Amino acid sequence: MSELVVNNVSMIFDTPDGGQVEALRDVSFSLKQGELLSVLGPSGCGKSTLLNIVAGFLAPTHGRVELASTEVHGPGAERGMVFQQGALFEWLTVAENIGFGPMMKGTPQAEIKRTVDHLLETVGLQDFGDKAIYELSGGMQQRVALARCLANDPDVILMDEPLGALDALTREKMQSLVLKLWKETGKTIVLITHSVEEALFLGERLFVMAPRPGRIKKEYQLPFADAGLHQNPREIKASPEFIATREEILTMIWEMEEEIMGRAEAVGG
């Protein structure tokens, strides 16, 4: 089992003026294989910093991250990343983008083709393999990004606002696709988002982060991701339980934002 463990992670950045910014303080949690965690909070609470530490793009000032009992010391194929913008290769076709990771590993061409064909069908792009990236809509490009990540068969998929640039209707369709892929692949997923509704709908577990220094203020165990696999998303999001939880979290984040604004005004005044 590829358990992800974040143990007392803190992150302090040096500033150009010689000062320091404490972005994270003593963040700890563990995720079992196949869990889906969403993380949200006010601006500057360290969400993306935490994700970048798990990805291995940043080394924490204190603490450690382990995957399958092995400490993370940089990026690795066992952790896949999906960014807000697809970060796709414009000069390659859809199929070539998806197969790029396996190709770099030296995977035989026949196996790459089988993987790519399967993933194209999985994300609903089976008729677009030969298309150029610029011919696709934003939602379709994010489907390619998801398929490219899955082609490397990571244990953990890290998502940094992957649906943030999409229009509302496309975003909701993509949320359903994320749930479908999560259930079909059994991957562990960590999703960073600014959308309370999205975090509620997609997260089996949800962390609300407190503002700088970033730390876990409250954790929720939620039923909506499982429900979203077989129920209409609109019905789920209109349910009294969903609305009550959404309003509770919105109020919590609003109060934290007000606190941040008050601190800034006090310093400025």
Image (cartoon, grey):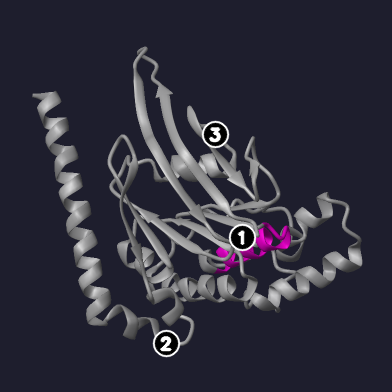
Q: Which residue was labeled with disc 2? A: 231
Q: Residue at x 27, y 41 (%)?
A: 211
Residue 20 location in percent, x, y? 36, 20
Residue 194 location in percent, x, y? 35, 55
- Total marks drawn? 3
Q: Is residue 84 visible?
A: no
Quarter of the picture holding the C terminus? top left
Q: Which residues are magenta?
A: 140-154
Q: Residue at x 23, y 74 (%)?
A: 243
Residue 52 location in percent, x, y? 52, 41
When asked about the image quadrant of residue 96, the answer is bottom right
Residue at the top extreme, as displayed: 18
Q: Residue at x 52, y 70 (%)?
A: 178
Kind of residue at disc 3: Leu
Toward the viewer: 136 or 27? 27
Toward the viewer: 157 or 90? 157
Residue at the left extreme, as displayed: 269
Sequence-wise first label, 3 or 2:
3
Kind of residue at disc 2: Gln
Vertical placement of 243 versus 109: above or below? Answer: below
Q: Is residue 236 visible?
A: yes
When asked about the image quadrant of residue 228, the answer is bottom left
Q: Which residue was labeled with disc 3? A: 58
Is 114 magenta? The answer is no
Kind of residue at disc 1: Ala
Sequence-wise first label, 1 or 3:
3
Name the secondary structure under disc 3.
loop
User: Are circles 1 and 3 on residues that touch, CB within 8 Å?
Assistant: no
Quarter of the picture holding the N terminus? bottom right
Please state which of the two labelled residues, at mark 2 or mark 1, is closer to the viewer: 2
Name the secondary structure under disc 2.
loop
Q: Which mark is residue 145?
A: 1
